[in-house]
Image (cartoon, helix red, strand yellow):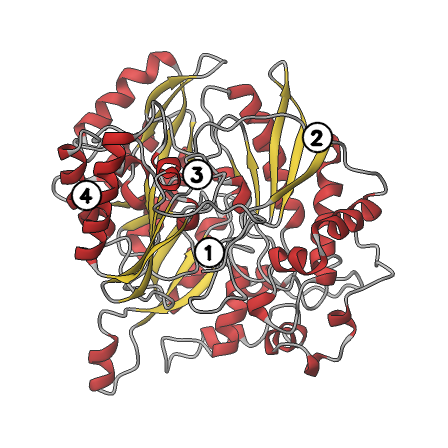
Amino acid sequence: MDTTPHSDRSRDLSQPLDKLGPDETLKANSNYLRGTIEKSLVDDLTASVTPNDAKLMKFFGIYQQDDRDFRDERRRQKLESAFFFMARLRLPGGVCSPAQWLKLDALARAYAGDTLRLTTRQTFQFHRVMKHDLRTVIRGLRDVLIDTRAACGDDTRGVMCGVNPLLSRLHSEVYALAKQASDHAVHKTRAYPEIWYGAERESSDAPEEPFYGRTYMPRKFKIGFAIPPSNDIDVYSQDLGFIAIANRGKLAGFNVAIGGGLGRTDQDPKTYPRLADVIGYVDAGRLIQTIDAIMSVQRDYGDRVDRMHARFKYTIDEKGIDWIKGEIEQRLGFPLARARSCTFTSNGDLLGWSKGEDGREHRTLFIENGRIANSEAHPALDGLREIARAHKGCFRLTPNQNLIIADVAPEDRAGIEAMIEAYHLDQPKSRSGLRLNAMACVALPTCGLAMAESERYLPDLISKIEVMLATHGLTDDPITIRMTGCPNGCARPYIAEIGLTGRAPGKYNLYLGGGFHGQRLNKMYLENAGEQAILAALDKVLEHYARDRKKGEPFGDFAIRAGYVAEVKEGRHFND
């Protein structure tokens, strides 16, 4: 990355550490993320690590968690919480080889409770990994050239890439750049191989973090690549989004969008979801220097005092989009070109079989909420292991938590389909347009931030809504619904036509009016509501939609036109 220091650094970076937020001191004094992690890992008196080490381990994609279903009971028995860890992989664009899949399957069975979780950012998560097994898991990943670097922390998170099987050549070009961007922007600290692989500490005068420095980014920084007409990655939710512009089927460059981010805190008006602004266009050959310029602006000017105000979206709103764009162009050394015309039509997945431009075939499987496990009726983990043993192509994780068995030779299609049928991988058989466009975060019992259920609850809630859909003749209509267990927005609920965010056990905020292809935020319709109130409200709006919608009118557009919520027009964000 470009490491040239800028002459006008942020006031925050020039201040003494004791004037900044405590996380800045932690990072600065951590010896490039080493902290005391190695000591914590060998402390067999506890299943946990120290609070500071738990924060630092997030930079390595590892979260300390505990089973909240048993938290109260363990407290009553005066026992330590049932601690374990979640490990998230760095998997640019969600591409995984069969050999890698088989290794992940083996690790999941041995160390992660016989389950794999596909995330909303196109990667895998292992849950319930014990502390003494962490090194074994990460070294197992190394065997198939996968790591967990920067899957969390104040750095560049996993880089997303749109998946459109119909555009094989263009997808290949964009994916290659997404992987290059991930490898370029990931942190470089030598602490990772030292701690997790047992590598010897190197003696070198070269800086460990030539771009990030000792304090890394002010907060997380998300990058994604979209390939129109599908906005499956929700490009406007990214800190930095690149929208592919093609010329006669070949990649020319990208429209550049900055300042997206969906995290918020209830009852705190200084926090809010925001959609990115498109600020111009760059040729594909200038991609990496554009990433450096934009990230360095946020590195130098992002808020390092108040972490609640430290995302790029707040820096842009404080400084102004024109000022930020000018600063980016100054660091680039050239002006951005005018953004080029492009069109998005959806943000869902094309399920079933499809054939790409190159003649290869692709089978997209619906994976409800991204959870792959075995059950008596649905042995998904076993079935996908058998497919991986036979498959000669690759797998692609979609941003909607689904899975593509990709690059299938036409002569191999029948064999793949036979295994899908044998293991009942196309579950559930009865699938509404709502269910097929649903997403949920993990939430309880493992996420420490969750206030309410999400993954475990949304399928049952959808079943109840499906009764209304059938009554109103809407079963097959695609409507996006997303649920999270807290306001942080990991499943991108604030862009959904129907969004639900947890407030307390059994209580949610209900949002309506998001854009069908991720182009518009929704607005709150009910606050802190239980299931009965949510179902009653949705029944009313769905009945009205079925009766009075215009031809081809998406549900979110109707909710605004019919006056259930107001459209977000001022800027690209809202406060409740």
Circles 3 and 4: CB distance less than 8 Å?
A: no
Kindly report the distance in space between the C-alpha atoms of the residues bearing marks 4 and 2: 44 Å
Q: Is residue 286 left or right of residue 273?
A: right
Please tell me which of labels 3 and 1 falls first in the chain: 1
Front tag of 4 and 1: 4
Q: Which residue is mark 4?
A: 465
Circles 4 and 1: CB distance less than 8 Å?
A: no
Kindly report the distance in space between the C-alpha atoms of the residues bearing marks 3 and 1: 39 Å
Residue 515 tag number: 3
Please tell me which of labels 1 and 2 falls first in the chain: 1
Q: Which residue is mark 1?
A: 138
Q: Is residue 151 above or below residue 181?
A: below
> Which secondary structure lies at badge 1?
helix
The quarter of the displayed image where residue 81 is located: bottom left
Please tell me which of labels 3 and 4 falls first in the chain: 4
Front tag of 3 and 2: 3
Residue positioned 50% across, 25% down in the render: 229
Q: Which residue is mark 2?
A: 284
Please tell me which of labels 4 and 1 falls first in the chain: 1
Residue positioned 48% across, 78% down in the render: 51
Q: Nearest the camera: 310 or 102?
A: 310
The quarter of the displayed image where residue 379 is located: top left
